Image (spheres, rainbow, N blue to C red):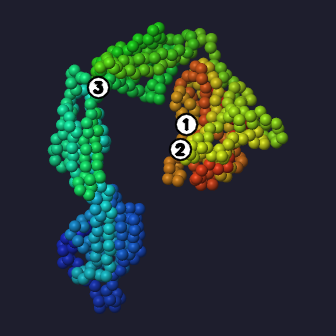
């Protein structure tokens, strides 16, 4: 039988005992049975089944206020007896304590569940065990359930919130108040919102339509709920804002909300891109001079949802850009504006090839002791800009740690090692290596591969995340993994080893955004305060993190960035 079904066959308080009494009396202990001896009953072997139990012993247990599931077994006790027995809570108001089974014969087990205690006061009862003739055994359990935190919780239209934003038109809202304390409520004085109590913690808020001849763009008030007596510090509040400020909402799976841009159109035969648009005032498209695209529809009415379609013409020249501007009518001198950045890839007739990554960009750490590393030391340690040896590229490291006085830690340093490898100490979460490659005419959809090898010392930080900058958004360059360390969730792509062999850090990414004149960027960012020995540091230390190279590859596994098919 399903455990939850069993637990539902429970005894709630002493009242049910009387119903079983006649039956139970027929099964009393047999004192003359030499195989059983004198009657006995005792509790043994306390087994805690849930972390909701905060303390336990053979004398009783304490449990949290809110357990969630009333059929969840919290704790159980082994029964040792040679008799029939019953068990009950020795108070009439203990129906919150669920006991199963409520009777038995001989050895057995008894289990306990509780319902949630949403009250701000604790509750307690005593569990007693009786022989079938009604005599009480010496075994008892003191059960205590903690009080819940005093609260006043608000839902508006069945959603938890403390804010209502209304528009131009009249509207009603259903407000539900779930409180475990008595409370007063008050609505700030106003002439446009009314609050009606409908009973059992239910209210109705009516917001009037905005004046047809407004003198301001918004108005506000609030409803305050406050506990009574000793709970007067328990409060909650709903802020109500009614606004006619012109606003345009545009949504689309293709829209990058960080910069409101769409993916570039193909140069030839590009498919239109559509977005969904809604505004609280009438709107229209602001035509751009010499536009190479069309937008339909060109205008719309307030509070209606539209599908806005952008269609480009074919492009035979260089990469080109446009700005689709949507503007509302003016209200009290203010208009709503939403701008969508669009672009189109270079056409076949363009004379502007991509530069910067037309060939691989490589760094080279030769690993040879005794080599003169004066130049790379100057570049990395002093200038924080280690140049690539093939192509144009720059490698830097950014320390972010400052103490309570705003000062950096003395362990936060950059080095070029005796083998030419760049390494750093004093790494802290948020610190990062940054690889930059200047490019021009870089097309959307270009695939770029990053590769290199890295490792840390035993006290270096081990969780790292490889990212690339696509438009204005940093994105994970490889599969994002999660773990929990020191009570915090960590998102990472790589765990660095504390010794050789080095870990290969590589990924191939496809850029959605074109770069007409800018940089391809990859960064390797420290994701957590967790050393190679799985320890959290109090402050930065001398543990290292480096970009390395291997003799068996001829040091060709030094960092490399290249365009791939």
Q: Quadrant of residue 546?
A: top right
Q: Position of residue 110 (x, y in %)?
A: 34, 71
Q: Earlier in the sequence, mark 2 or mark 1?
A: 1
Kindly identify which residue carries mark 2. 491
In the drawing, does residue 354 fall left or right of residue 174? right
**Label 3 environment density (alpha carbons within 10 Å; few <14, some 14–19, many ≥20):** some
Q: CA distance from mark 2 to mark 1?
A: 10 Å
Q: Position of residue 298 (x, y in %)?
A: 35, 14
Q: Is residue 293 visible?
A: yes
Asked which secondary structure carries label 2, the reply is: strand
Of residues 30 and 166, the one drawn nearer to the viewer in this rendering: 166
Residue for point 68% across, 34% down: 384
Indicate which disc residue 34 carries: none
Asked which secondary structure carries label 1, the reply is: strand
Residue for point 21% across, 21% down: 212
Residue for point 24% across, 67% down: 94
Q: CA distance from mark 2 to mark 3?
A: 43 Å
Kindly identify which residue carries mark 1. 476
Residue for point 29% across, 81% down: 137
Image position of 114 with respect to 516: above or below:
below
Q: Position of residue 214 (x, y in %)?
A: 24, 23
Do residues under tags 2 and 1 come within 8 Å of each other at their CB atoms?
yes
**Label 2 environment density (alpha carbons within 10 Å; few <14, some 14–19, many ≥20):** some
Do residues under tags 2 and 3 come within 8 Å of each other at their CB atoms?
no
Q: Is residue 109 visible?
A: no
């Amino acid at each position: 039988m399903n455990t939850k079904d069993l637990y539902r066959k429970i005894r709630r308080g002493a009242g049910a005992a009387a119903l079983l009494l006649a039956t139970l009396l027929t099964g009393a202990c047999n004192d003359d049975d030499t195989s059983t001896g004198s009657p006995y009953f005792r509790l043994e072997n306390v087994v805690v089944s849930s972390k909701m139990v905060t303390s336990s012993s053979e004398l009783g247990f304490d449990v949290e206020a809110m357990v969630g599931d009333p059929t969840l077994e919290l704790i159980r006790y082994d029964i040792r007896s040679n008799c029939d027995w019953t068990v009950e809570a020795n108070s009439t108001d203990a129906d919150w304590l669920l006991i199963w089974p409520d009777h038995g014969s001989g050895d057995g087990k008894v289990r306990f569940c509780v319902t949630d205690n949403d009250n701000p006061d604790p509750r307690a009862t005593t569990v007693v065990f009786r022989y079938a003739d009604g005599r009480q055994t010496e075994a008892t359990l003191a059960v205590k359930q903690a009080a819940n935190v005093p609260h006043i919780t608000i839902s508006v239209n069945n959603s938890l919130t403390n804010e209502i934003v209304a528009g131009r038109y009249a509207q009603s809202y259903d407000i539900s108040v779930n409180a475990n304390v008595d409370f007063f409520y008050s609505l700030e004085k106003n002439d446009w919102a009314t609050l009606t109590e409908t009973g059992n913690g239910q209210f109705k808020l009516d917001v009037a339509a905005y004046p047809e001849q407004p003198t301001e763009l918004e108005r506000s008030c609030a409803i305050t709920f406050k506990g009574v007596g000793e709970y007067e510090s328990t409060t909650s509040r709903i802020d109500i804002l009614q606004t006619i400020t012109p606003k345009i909402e545009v949504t689309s799976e293709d829209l990058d909300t960080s910069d409101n841009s769409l993916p570039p159109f193909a140069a030839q035969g590009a498919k239109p891109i559509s977005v969904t648009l809604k505004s609280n005032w009438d709107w229209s498209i602001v035509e751009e001079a010499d536009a190479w695209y069309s937008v339909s529809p060109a205008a719309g009415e307030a509070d209606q949802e539209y599908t806005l379609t952008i269609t480009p013409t074919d492009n035979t020249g260089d990469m080109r850009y446009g700005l689709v501007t949507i503007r509302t009518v003016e209200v009290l001198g203010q208009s709503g504006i939403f701008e969508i950045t669009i672009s189109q890839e270079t056409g076949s007739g363009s004379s502007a090839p991509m530069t910067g990554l037309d060939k691989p960009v490589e760094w080279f750490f030769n690993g040879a002791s005794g080599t003169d590393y004066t130049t790379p030391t100057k570049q990395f340690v002093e200038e924080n800009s280690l140049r690539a040896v093939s192509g144009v590229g720059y490698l830097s490291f950014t320390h972010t740690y400052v103490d309570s006085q705003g000062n950096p830690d003395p362990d936060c340093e950059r080095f070029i090692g005796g083998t030419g490898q760049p390494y750093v100490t004093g790494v802290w979460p948020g610190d990062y290596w940054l690889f930059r490659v200047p490019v021009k005419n870089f097309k959307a959809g270009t695939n770029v591969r990053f590769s290199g090898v890295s490792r840390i010392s035993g006290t270096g930080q081990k969780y790292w995340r490889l990212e690339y900058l696509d438009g204005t958004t940093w994105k994970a360059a490889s599969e994002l993994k999660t773990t929990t360390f020191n009570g915090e969730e960590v998102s990472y792509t790589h765990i660095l080893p504390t010794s050789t062999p080095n870990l290969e850090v590589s990924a191939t990414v496809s850029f959605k955004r074109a770069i007409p004149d800018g940089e391809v960027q990859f960064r390797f960012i420290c994701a957590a305060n967790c050393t190679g020995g799985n320890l959290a540091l109090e402050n930065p230390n001398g543990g290292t993190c480096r970009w390395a190279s291997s003799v068996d590859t001829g040091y060709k596994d030094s960092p490399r960035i290249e365009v791939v098919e």
